[in-house]
């Protein structure tokens, strides 16, 4: 079925809608995908590029949210609709995998394990003209964080000329990962039917992607959400080798603290502490890993987060640990929407079975990793002197609710946050 | 038209699709919206909440990308589908507007100027049971950035007990803003027809939101992209008053630099420099404004950004200023997708007509503000000693392409970035 655009400014006026049971927007001649198959050849490439609409085998498109900007660029005439990327010289700077976990459809459901190595994994499909795009990119960088320079000055770290360069810069390998969801696996992870998941994703986003409910044959979805970035310290090929000790921080984005160092939470201090542990581990011959997830404000978004701040700081009795979670629930309906259920996938992608030092007190993160079979040897709490002034409320509330708290000196009864007028 | 869910795990099995000309998913009984009307009452509320599907007057839903997480929460049974927010005590900490610019449909097309003050602006609609949600939230915070502490140590700033507290913490008012697009205005901004814009947004996202092409009567769209955050220094009510001098930095997100201080670009150093100018201006009785836009990697996303890094660093001849833009074009088809055309909207929202000190060398940002009628008195380049080692390539390339460069000591011919193996 199709309609005519009411005010189409382009020559082609026939719009193919995609909301119908019969294959229209996505035809059935895309390559077969066997998620969790034991090899790349048996698995097949994910095709979500819009230059190949008839050969797509996934719902959605690449670049997460930024697909909207690409569409704007095409509308504005800045980008040809049929532009194909020239991927010369873009291949990963470092090898990741393959690992045995890639051949287990239950272990990885929210990213494409072959997303960084399409050239190697799907040479025939690409030679045949399929527009396969990477959903993962891996590069190298030097980072120069003020907190690492502080650690050098304080003598907790020292320059070794390799992990830490002479100017205090730290050598890293980093990976950007776009979400690629295998819908049956996501449904299983949350204990719902695939149909119920698809229906909720369609209905409760205001009708985004009707193919979610009409095209049950398309099992993969690239949702328009932020992905994640990995920062790897030491030799990346030793991550997941089963013998090299690993320090790790799993960090969920908090722009107000991570970038602007707001004092209402422990986010940046804990991130910086985690990086210090990773650097220290790499200097001792181990490896370090920071997983940075784009899940602002517990995946509720920043508008909700700021509404909650106001509600906390204005409520009768002031901002107290005992009402910390309650205020988020009133505004958002839940305490948290980060869904740590999907978080372990990236550990399976890296072949990791054990984390030796885990820079986190979160019971949610620990439990999710534990359930995924990833063993955590030591949990490292944030040093108390790194907890900012106004962040005690959060800390007391979380420790009271089940946060790992060895050594934490609770002052629950006397903790109160700043008011809005203070 | 409707279909039955193939594997619906819920009791209600009738799915209403939203891709048809006749009002189905969104009915015609939502409140009338007159974008750019001279008052809130005449304009009417934007209703994009999914608890009121029949009374919606906008395409998409709140929270940008995070709508997907909300849908997941509903699928998982963690959030009731009909949850309505309790907005007690969430109102803005500080007043913004109304400003005359709010009544001009050409000046603001990408945010809802009444988004923070729904309670005041639409009391009758809310009393009548409409589920109107804020798309803007305003709160207060204290930020404690290492670069500000450096500026205090170096004597460039000093503690005044008001803007900068005794511990070096800086008092700010901050606003989180979700994108709300008035489609006819967006189309006009890009010089295309509304039909062509709607069609591109639908087709080139892989068929997201068929209502874009079927529901020409719905003029407002909440796209699933990141929004922006404002950091205001000094008294927020004096921003846009026409007399108080304003320092400003418009910053587009760069996670690798903003959070991790990668040395390949000037992003965080320029942001920190901009904040220092804002603090300085506020201490002198002026005001400061940082606009932080969620447009990672020039709105191309981080995967594309890392692919480009590899292509730059591996190309024959090495990473040079003369091929800096070319490598992005090869991978992405364009040099940049940030669309500064929409950026000035937030200045109109704040009532700003003049920026006294603008911490940016970007010709794109300057030209966009200039075209929007916002006068810039002084452009402040980044101090050369803040340009990180590997960022010279970017700087030389941009200055050569039209960046504001008074005082910049070019070393174009001898500048080369690090290779991947260095």
Image (tube, coloured by chain):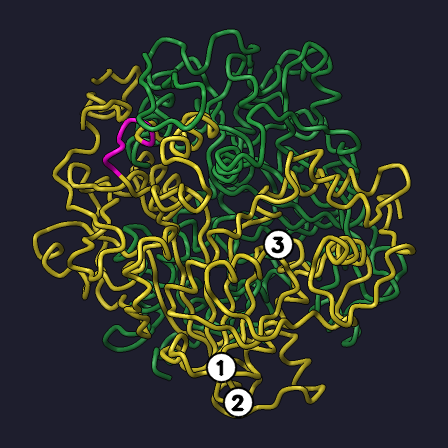
Chain colours: A green, B yellow
Which class describes the residues within 10 Å of circle 1: few (<14), some (14-19), or many (20+)?
many
Which mark is first along the chain, 1 or 2? Answer: 1
Q: Quadrant of residue A98?
A: top right
Q: Name the residue under label 2.
A: B284
Looking at the rendered structure, whether the residues under marks 3 and 2 are on a common chain is answered as yes
Q: What element carries label 2?
A: loop
Discs 3, 2 touching: Cβ within 8 Å: no
Discs 2, 1 touching: Cβ within 8 Å: yes
Q: Which chain carries label 2?
A: B
Q: Which image quarter is the C terminus of chain A in?
A: bottom left
Residues in magenta, as a range: B212-218
Residue that appears at 36% across and 48% down: B63
Q: Mark 3 points at which residue?
A: B254
Q: Which residue lies furthest to the left in this view?
A: B128
Residue B130 appears at what percent x and percent y?
Answer: 14, 50
Front residue of A36 and B146: B146
Left or right placement of residue B33 versus residue B139 in this view: left
Residue A280 appears at what percent x and percent y?
Answer: 77, 59
Residue that appears at 34% across and 78% down: A420
Front residue of B122 and A235: B122
Residue that appears at 43% across and 67% down: A394
């Amino acid at each position: 079925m199709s309609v005519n655009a009411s005010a189409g400014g382009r020559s082609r006026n026939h719009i193919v809608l995609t909301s119908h049971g019969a294959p229209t927007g996505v035809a059935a001649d895309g390559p077969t995908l066997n998620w969790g198959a034991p090899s790349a050849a048996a698995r097949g490439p994910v095709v979500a590029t819009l230059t190949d609409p008839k050969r797509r085998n996934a719902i959605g498109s690449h670049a997460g949210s930024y697909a909207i900007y690409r569409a704007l660029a095409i509308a504005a005439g800045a980008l040809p609709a049929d532009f194909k990327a020239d991927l010369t010289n873009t291949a990963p700077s470092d090898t990741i995998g393959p690992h045995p976990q890639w051949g287990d459809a239950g272990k990885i459901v929210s990213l494409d394990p072959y997303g960084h190595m399409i050239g190697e994994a799907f040479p025939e499909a690409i030679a045949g003209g399929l527009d396969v795009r990477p959903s993962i990119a891996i590069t190298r960088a030097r980072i120069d964080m003020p907190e690492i320079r502080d650690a050098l000055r304080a003598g907790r770290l020292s320059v070794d000329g390799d992990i830490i360069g002479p100017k205090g810069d730290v050598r890293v390998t980093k990976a950007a990962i776009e979400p690629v969801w295998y819908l049956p696996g996501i449904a299983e992870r949350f204990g719902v039917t695939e149909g119920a998941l698809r229906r909720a994703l369609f209905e409760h986003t205001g009708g985004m992607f009707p193919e979610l409910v009409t095209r049950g044959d398309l099992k993969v979805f690239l949702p328009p959400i932020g992905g994640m970035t990995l920062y790897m310290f030491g030799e990346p090929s030793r991550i997941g080798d089963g013998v090299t000790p690993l320090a790790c921080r799993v960090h969920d984005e908090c722009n107000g603290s991570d970038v602007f160092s707001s004092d209402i939470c422990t986010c940046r201090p804990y991130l910086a502490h985690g990086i210090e542990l990773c650097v220290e581990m790499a200097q001792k011959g181990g490896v370090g890993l920071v997983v940075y997830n784009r899940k602002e404000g517990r995946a509720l978004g920043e508008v909700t987060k700021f509404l909650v701040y106001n509600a906390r700081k204005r409520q009768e009795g002031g901002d107290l640990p005992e009402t910390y979670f309650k205020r988020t629930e009133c505004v958002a309906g839940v305490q948290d929407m980060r869904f740590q259920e999907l978080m372990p996938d990236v550990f399976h992608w890296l072949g990791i079975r054990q984390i030796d030092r885990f820079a986190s007190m979160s019971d949610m993160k620990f439990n999710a990793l534990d359930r995924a079979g990833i063993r955590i040897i030591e949990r490292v709490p944030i040093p108390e002197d790194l907890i900012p002034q106004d962040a005690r409320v959060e800390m007391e509330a979380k420790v009271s609710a089940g946060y790992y708290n060895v050594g934490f000196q609770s002052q629950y009864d006397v903790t109160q946050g700043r008011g809005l007028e203070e």
